[in-house]
Image (cartoon, coloured by chain):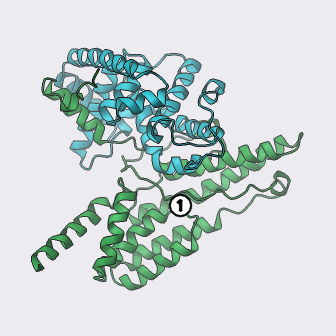
Amino acid sequence: MRPPPRLIDDPSAASELRADLERVAASAAPYDAGAGLLALQSAIAATTSASAAPRGSARLGSSAAKIGAASAAVVVLAAAAVFAWTGFSPPAEPKPAATAASSASARRSAPTPRPPPRPAQQLPAAEPLAPSAAPNAVINRAPPPDAALQREVAQLGRIKQLLPGDPQQAYRLAQAGHREFRAGILRHEREGLAILALWQLERRAEAGRRTRAFLARYPESPLRERLAQRLARTGERSAQER
Amino acid sequence: MKDGDVVSHERQDAGAEGRLDAQALFRAHAVFVASFLQRIGTPAAEVDDLVQEVFLVVHRKGGYVPGAGRPRTWLAAIALRVARSGRRTRGRRREQPDEDALLAASSSATPDAELEARLALSRMQQALAGLDLEHRAAFVLYELDGESCEAIASAFGVPIGTVYSRLHHARRRFSSAYAALGGEDGASRLRPRLLEGT
């Protein structure tokens, strides 16, 4: 038995049907992966804390997780502002999600204007989750928002600001960001800006190499088209020079 | 939701090499899982939570180990079970195309293309609504995501003949239901309501 031809490729299928399938296949759900990842990390941390807590402290562990989730929400809100400002796809509906259920109830109780559809995005390479603090160490005071993420968001905005007029400094800052925020969640965006800076600096070999790696790693990046065009233009120029 | 029926499937070898943990899988495939759930008819308001549920199940399973299908089809199999559990919990009260999804769907570049993508998703959801979830999943993975029948069979733990059979049945029902929608007429009925929300 052989697999059937796909309807999209089947000339005997109705053309409207094939066109609809192509449209749906080419689109993606407008899922806010940045906020979702933070929610998942909070939920995993809560699970880990709960399983590590001694009997009787589970309720306290749950409270700690909620506090941690609230902190994450504050950081996500800050990130949303910078994303919008920098022109990247914004995480428009931050989720204070210690658990899936709590994220749902939070959204239902606080309706927000519907965000415009966003390009699908992929996130940077996996980094290990930081070990969870012991529940009792957390419940005495609310932990500060993720200071590292706040710095990372601010730095990304600075890179974006520098890029048009000072690509050298923008590139240096992006590279410094890669070193400083090894576990950061904005590597994808930062690497895109670093590559754009390289193109502006006419460092074509490195820019080309990193563009190809970027396109392979983040095929759904909002920067994909811009970088691919840049790479194609360089290829054409090289061919003409030969 | 009870996840025993989800977690009990495919226990993985904790020491295997090439393992991908839940966060790595999330970074690479969260959008795919969200799109898969949306395409098989999950109401838009529930997609975010079900995506979280899927990756929490992945975390509890210890991540993905090569061998249980490809990561995407393996995740789709988990997503299908999570979606099915969610449906059992809430009942089958929403089998119509989800207009929230219509308003939220698509990453198309222009407003016209975006609207067309939303309408296409609506028509597809309507045409799939009469199928059970297993048939929808096989159809979506094969027709829209370009997965092979072998990968689908491996991830869902069924013989490849079962995948062929599900595809055959799903394509026949889908094509028939799609034709009954009336093509552009169906789009025309939905267009004004969509424009209200944009």
Picture coordinates of residue B172 (x, y %)? 26, 15
> Which chain is painted in green?
A
Q: How many marks?
A: 1
Which subunit holds the residue at mark 1?
A
- Which chain is cyan in the picture? B
Q: Amino acid at mark 1?
A: Ile
Asked where in the image residue A57 lies, by quadrant, the reply is top right
- The residue at which mark 1 appears reads as A185
Q: Nearer the viewer, residue A92 or A38?
A: A38
Identify the secondary structure beneath mark 1: loop
- Crowding near pointer 1: few (<14 within 10 Å), some, many (20+)? many
Q: Residue at x 42, y 80 (%)?
A: A170
Q: Position of residue A71 (x, y in %)?
A: 66, 56
Closest to the observer: B120 or B79?
A: B79
Residue ID at (57%, 74%): A180
**Res B21 seen here:** yes
Residue A32 vertical position relative to residue A86 in the rendered view, above or below:
above
Q: Quadrant of the C terminus of chain B?
A: top left
In the rendered image of this protein, does residue B15 appear above or below residue A214? above
Q: Is residue B189 above or below residue A19?
A: above
- One can see residue A94 in this view: no
Split into 4 quadrants, where in the image is the N terminus of chain B?
top right
At horizontal 24% and vertical 29% (from top left) the residue drawn is A6
Foreground pick, A207 / B148 = B148
Q: Is residue A58 left or right of residue A202?
A: right
Residue A185's spot in the image, x, y percent?
53, 61
Q: Position of residue B103 (x, y in %)?
A: 36, 37
